[in-house]
């Protein structure tokens, strides 16, 4: 499994220095609250503490310290009223996205017994409009979370919702950090004529921070040729543990029980792909090569589905047909722990109001509905060659589809939609297939989705992840369109 880096986040608290001599013990109380906040956030991210900032001079100093720490995100914990001059210079210098935390210690004040000291110790919301005004006038985008610091016996929801938002921000910052440090391979070229998939490699570097490593088929050929028989045997053992080997399809004459020689070749190519990923330190791979008349590169391209499915499940997102943008979308869902399978629209079911979606390419095995299967294919429709393919579907329950496209101005844009994976029959043709139902009926969904100029591929993941994806895309500074 590829190791996912945690986000690096700065946490600083604010309060008005004039209060400390007026109300002894308040500063220490708020510092203890902040320590609890930092401890909780450290469950999801690497925390750099900026301590309690109670004047503009400290704000400037901590901002400079934060700048040196290579932060992905800053949390401003509001303990009590503070001036905006204690926040703006810090954020300006730190140059990282900021989330303001309005976490009230109590669900409500005991109005009959609350004095000024106690009120100010709960006065976290007072200065947030002032901070928002300063940010707006300074051209700084910000986000806020409002809720409770701790739950109370009869009031839990504001605490649960707030801390779920904070966790999502930490996870989103980790996705952004990992994308910025990732290396995506492009092996071969995009499927000829699929104009939606052509990508500007420089824009991927510029907008996502991803390095694009251009690979040759001979890079893979050299490694596949060097594979030993014992490595093939080890890979075969792994495959037999993960997959069920299918008999002949009762429906499709092209889908047969895989031949031993095709299984052997797929395992050999899978070992070569492992070496390719390791040698070039790849976090993802977009691949396609046509080949000709059974030549070596045609055989290589035809043998990649099995190995790329295993790689995708291990955290190396693999996208067929050379779709680099979709590899990025798959990577986002994988970094969120939601899977991310190579998917496209297959057919509409207007009777039961769902869309069949899948592909003949890699599947994220961690989200499969039961044990995935391997079938032998006499040919790959629309492609050259033959071999083995993965047949499965995403497990039933909530799902999210995520696509990455490119606008006419050259900006990358994400599209997202949530739905449900429904139980029921799937095609038995050696492809991955899932019955997906969205809030819109199939025709309305298709119209809304295509209006945004998508690629014809998307990434499929489990769970409803729009909230987290919104945060990721915000941190990346890109556009997101939610289809609902």
Image (cartoon, rainbow, N blue to C red):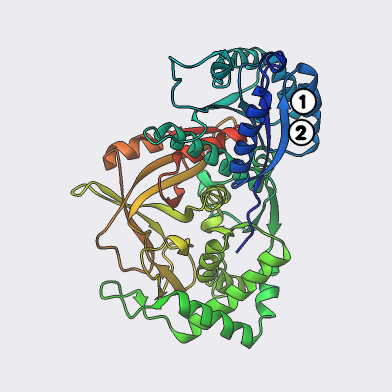
Give the secondary structure at mark 1. helix
Toward the front, the furthest residue is 113
- Along the viewing direction, whichever of 159 and 227 lies nearer the viewer: 159
Q: In which quarter of the image is residue 93?
A: top right
Badge count: 2
For the residues carrying marks 2 and 1, which lies nearer the camera in this image?
A: 2
Q: Do the residues labelled 2 and 1 touch (CB within 8 Å)?
A: yes
Question: Looking at the picture, how far across and down is residue 234, in whole percent?
Answer: 58, 83
The structure residue drawn at horizontal position 51% and vertical position 53%, both measured from the top left corner, is 337
Q: Image quadrant for the C terminus?
A: top left
Determine if residue 437 is in view.
yes
Q: In which quarter of the image is residue 192?
A: bottom right
The structure residue drawn at horizontal position 64% and vertical position 58%, both measured from the top left corner, is 3
Mark 2 or 1 closer to N-term?
2
Label 2 vs label 1: CA separation? 8 Å
Give the secondary structure at mark 2. helix
Crowding at dot 1, Cα within 10 Å, few <14 / some 14-19 / many 20+, comes out as some
The structure residue drawn at horizontal position 57% and vertical position 41%, both measured from the top left corner, is 172
Crowding at dot 2, Cα within 10 Å, few <14 / some 14-19 / many 20+, comes out as many
As drawn, 417 above or below 379:
above
Q: Quadrant of residue 184?
A: bottom right
Apparent side of residue 446 relative to residue 233 in the rendered image (left or right): left
Determine if residue 265 is in view.
no
Q: Image quadrant for the N terminus?
A: bottom right
- Along the viewing direction, whichever of 261 and 232 lies nearer the viewer: 232
Question: Looking at the picture, how far across and down is residue 82, in whole percent?
Answer: 65, 16
The structure residue drawn at horizontal position 64% and vertical position 47%, both measured from the top left corner, is 179
- Name the residue carrying label 1: 93
- Name the residue carrying label 2: 66
Question: Looking at the picture, how far across and down is residue 140, in whole percent?
Answer: 65, 21
């Amino acid at each position: 499994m590829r190791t996912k880096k945690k986000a690096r986040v700065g946490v600083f608290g604010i309060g008005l220095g004039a209060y400390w001599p007026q109300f002894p013990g308040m500063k220490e109380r708020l510092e203890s609250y902040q320590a609890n906040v930092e401890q909780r956030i450290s469950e999801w991210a690497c925390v750099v503490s900026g301590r309690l900032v109670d004047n503009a001079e400290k704000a400037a100093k901590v901002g400079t310290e934060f700048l040196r720490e290579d932060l992905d995100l800053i949390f401003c914990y509001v303990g009590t009223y503070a001036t905006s001059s204690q926040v703006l210079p810090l954020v300006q210098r730190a140059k990282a996205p900021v989330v303001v935390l309005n976490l009230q210690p109590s669900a409500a004040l005991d109005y009959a017994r609350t004095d000024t000291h106690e009120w100010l110790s709960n006065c976290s919301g007072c200065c947030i409009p002032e901070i928002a005004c300063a940010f707006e006038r300074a051209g700084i985008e910000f986000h806020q979370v409002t809720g409770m610091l701790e739950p109370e016996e009869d009031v839990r929801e504001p605490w649960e919702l707030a801390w779920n938002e904070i966790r999502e921000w930490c996870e989103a910052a980790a996705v952004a950090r990992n994308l910025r440090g990732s290396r995506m391979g492009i092996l071969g070229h995009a499927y000829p004529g699929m104009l939606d998939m052509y990508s500007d490699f420089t824009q991927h570097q510029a907008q996502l921070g991803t390095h694009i490593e251009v690979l040759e088929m001979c890079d893979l050929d050299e490694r596949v040729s060097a594979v030993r028989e014992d490595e093939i045997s080890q890979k075969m053992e792994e495959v037999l543990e993960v997959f069920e080997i299918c008999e002949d399809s009762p429906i499709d004459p092209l889908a047969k029980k895989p031949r031993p020689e095709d299984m052997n070749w797929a395992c050999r190519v899978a070992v070569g792909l492992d070496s390719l990923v390791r040698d070039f330190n790849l976090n993802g791979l977009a691949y396609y090569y046509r080949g000709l008349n059974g030549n070596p590169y045609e055989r290589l391209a035809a043998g990649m589905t099995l190995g790329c499915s295993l790689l995708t499940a291990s955290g190396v997102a693999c996208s067929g047909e050379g779709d680099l943008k979709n590899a990025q979308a798959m990577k986002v869902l994988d970094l969120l722990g939601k899977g991310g399978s190579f998917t496209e629209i297959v057919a509409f079911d207007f009777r039961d109001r769902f869309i069949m979606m899948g592909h003949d390419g890699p599947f994220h095995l961690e989200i499969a509905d039961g044990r995935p299967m391997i079938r032998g294919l006499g040919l790959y429709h629309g492609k050259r060659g033959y071999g083995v393919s993965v047949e499965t579907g995403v497990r039933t329950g909530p799902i999210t589809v995520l696509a990455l496209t490119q606008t006419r101005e050259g900006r990358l844009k994400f599209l997202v939609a949530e739905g449900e994976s429904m139980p029921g029959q799937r095609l038995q043709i050696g492809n991955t297939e899932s019955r997906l139902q969205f809030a819109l009926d199939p025709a309305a969904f298709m119209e809304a989705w295509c209006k945004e100029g998508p690629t014809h591929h998307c990434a499929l993941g489990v769970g409803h992840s729009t909230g987290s994806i919104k945060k990721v895309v915000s941190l990346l500074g890109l556009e997101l369109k939610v289809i609902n």
